[in-house]
Amino acid sequence: MTDVVADIVADVVAAIRHGSMVYCRNRFHAPWGVAIPAGTIASFHVVGAGKCWLVPDGGEPLRLNEGDVVLVPSGNGHALVDLPGRPARDVAELIGGQPGQVVPPPELVIDGDGPVTTLLCGGFVLDARRHPLAALLPPVVHIDSGQAAGTGLAAAIDLLRAEIDRTDPGAPAVIAALADLLFVYLLRAWLTERRDHDGWVRALYDPTVGGALALIHADPAHPWTVAALARAVAVPRATFSRRFTTLTGQPPMSYVTTWRMAVAARLLRDHQAPLREVARKVGYDSEFAFARAFKRSTGQAPGRYRVAAR
């Protein structure tokens, strides 16, 4: 994956992610089964040792082996089991509350006479409406150990597994940051496997459209126009506009606005900067013009969005 694409992916993750958590470190001896009900959390699972099956609600079982990573981005319900057909207990029953709302035990153990599987389970609070790339994710993203080997994803997994065992006061913040990093690398790995697909994935790797996306992401406050973007990537304006719209599904200036609002939402969510500063960082000289654009995009005034997001 090129550095430009990697930077755009990291930007998208920052825009759509509201929070990260690791809610369960598990040592399960067969027979066992754990159910994660449908909700707002996009779950991820890392198989540290052994093997198991992921069973999506209404879907086919997926075998997971040691070193595999799986993401359920839509918050769909699913179960992790040692064998398909095994009864599964709700994760909230096992950890004493809903994931993200209780402090989980240092290690969750299910005793049994069979083989052991170790898992690291966590989640992300995502808002897929903030970027069209997020809408492309399938119900289950599976990266096997072979795909992850020697990549940043494997390094992030190793760091996360090491940090989860520490008891330092700052460990929770480090774990959350590493979970963010894991999400970035997971999405990168998935995109790399699909770089020849049409639409948004192809747009990222396209020299013309990808170059324009990189410019927009690098400086959302710049007074971009279609003509300025076309000049920057050395393509005639009509050709550029047509190609950009075909690959991303949006005209260039619509995407500029979409991205500005995504950046603004992140700034409102994660920082205390006044509205006039947020407006300036996304290319609006007027706080009132920014507020109108933000409400048109999200359905909420910036101040109300900030309160609700927190």
Image (cartoon, grey):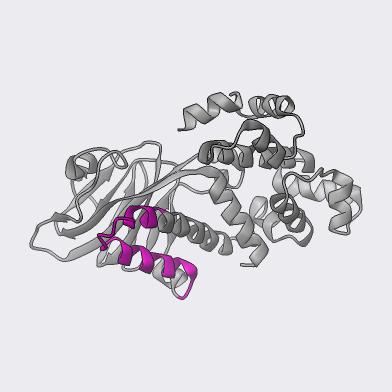
Instruction: Specify whether residue 133 is in view.
Output: yes
Residue 131 within the segment the image draws in magenta: no
Most extreme residue toward the bottom is 150
Residue 58: quarter of image: top left
Task: In this rendered view, identify the residue nearer to me: 13 or 60.
Answer: 13
Which residue appears at 12% of the width and 64% of the height? Answer: 114
Residue 155: quarter of image: bottom left
Q: Is residue 140 left or right of residue 201?
A: left
Q: In the image, residue 98 lies at what x, y percent?
A: 27, 38
Q: Is residue 149 left or right of residue 34?
A: right
Q: In the image, residue 75 lies at what x, y percent?
A: 40, 41
Which residue appears at 36% of the width and 49% of the height? Answer: 21
Secondary structure predominantly adopted by residues drawn in magenta: helix
Which residue appears at 32% of the width and 57% of the height? Answer: 171
Question: Does residue 157 lie above or below 36 as drawn?
Answer: below
Instruction: Specify whether residue 60 is in view.
Output: no
Residue 174 within the segment the image draws in magenta: yes
Q: Magenta segment, which residues?
A: 150-176
Question: Does residue 263 lie above or below 8 as drawn?
Answer: above
Which residue appears at 37% of the width and 67% of the height? Answer: 159
Q: Is residue 80 left or right of residue 207?
A: left
Task: In this rendered view, identify the residue nearer to me: 15 or 236.
Answer: 15
